[in-house]
Amino acid sequence: MSISVSGISKYYGEQKALDEVNFSIKKGEIVGFLGPNGAGKSTLMKILTGYLEPSEGEASVNGFSVKDNLIKAQRSVGYLPEHNSLYTEMYVREYLAFNASLYKTDKSRIEKVIQETGLTPEANKKINQLSKGYRQRVGLANALLHDPEVLILDEPTTGLDPNQLVEIRDLIKKTGEEKTIFLSTHIMREVEALCERVIIINKGKIVADKKLSELRDENRQVIEVEFDYRIEEEALHRLPYIVSVRNVYDFVYELSFDNPKDMRPVVFDFAHDNGLKTLQLNRKNKNLESLFAELTAVPAPEGGV
Ligand code: ADP
């Protein structure tokens, strides 16, 4: 296994930021780690890269325990932190050479990573002269310097403009042909563009771990319905094949069914039988977005609509 996480919990004082997290990632996989802000993504990534110790549990990278064999684990992993802090007064090549000497990396890697990350035209510029997209490339080049087996990227495209975003995604995808990549994001499209598998975290707990292909083929069906008046969610839970009910806003509900058959007529009849009028009734494809919404929804206040 490239990454193995077993029973990891992390407390910050009283607060439980990670709650018995378990998963493993095989060599060569590109896995998206998706969750709302504050879900615990950065905390787990810091544990995997040895910047934080877990309160409970075990983790290993490339077979090396981050507790018992940290140096070897760190040698196996390239890390691009969320706030990629670079020495901005340094020139690109100088900065990479400095880090290579610090970590006693083979000097031939410097030119190789400059070329691989498309930094050749910028290599003699000062880092503070570079755009945000190119600074991210410097961060990636730095993470790749010691030719690690595993790359851990914490929100690698946050703050980039649309063109830079596409370029960095392409670069990550290319890098993923040879390495295991575990990347965090709160952008669902990023996962769809890059990853084969997604792990969703909410409030410190893993709430889904799925292959994207599974998600696309899933039997589930999502229907969005708008009634002219409120209905107790409990009543909606009595619909056949219903899996979940989400109150989107006002009298609009998103209903998930575990049945591929078109459930719209059933919902229409249900409304009629309950004295409601149906103002809208749309079938939506089950996708990452609806799964994410379902799994990370903030519960409606008690007694609410
Ligand atoms: P994410 O990366 O998903 O946004 P984080 O791992 O940064 O989430 O944070 C998870 C939770 O832990 C949040 O509630 C955050 O406020 C809290 N947290 C993170 N770092 C610290 C810290 N150094 N001290 C106290 N609480 C922290």
Image: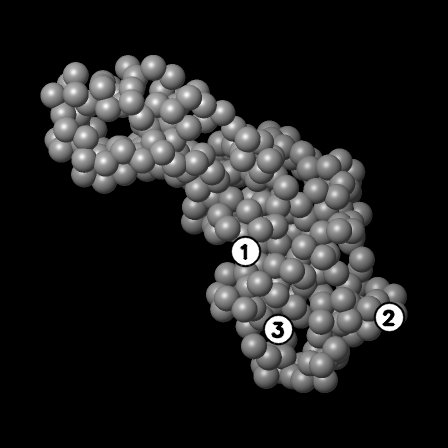
Q: Quadrant of residue 169?
A: bottom right
Amino acid type indicated by mark 2: Lys
Vertical placement of residue 3 versus 181, above or below: above
Q: Residue at x 72, y 57 (%)?
A: 174
Residue at 57% x, 59% y is 156
Task: Tell me residue 243's x, y (percent).
Answer: 39, 22
How far apart are the alpha carbons under marks 3 and 2? Answer: 22 Å
Whole-angstrom CA distance, mark 1 to mark 3, is 15 Å
- Mark 1–mark 3 CB contact (< 8 Å): no
Q: Is residue 293 above or below residue 179?
A: above
Q: Residue flagged by tag 3: what amino acid is it? A: Tyr
Tell whether 124 sits left or right of 295: right
**Image check: 77 left or right of 182?**
right
Quarter of the image that includes the N terminus? top right
Q: Point out the tag, 1 or 3, that comes first from the N-terminus.
A: 3
| Residue position marked by numbered label 3 in the rendering | 134
Residue bearing the label numbered 1: 155
Look at 62% across and 73% down and name the residue there.
134
**Residue 85 seen from this side:** no
Label 2, on which residue? 107
Quadrant location of the C terminus in the rendered image: top left
Callout 1: CB less than 8 Å from ligand 1 = yes
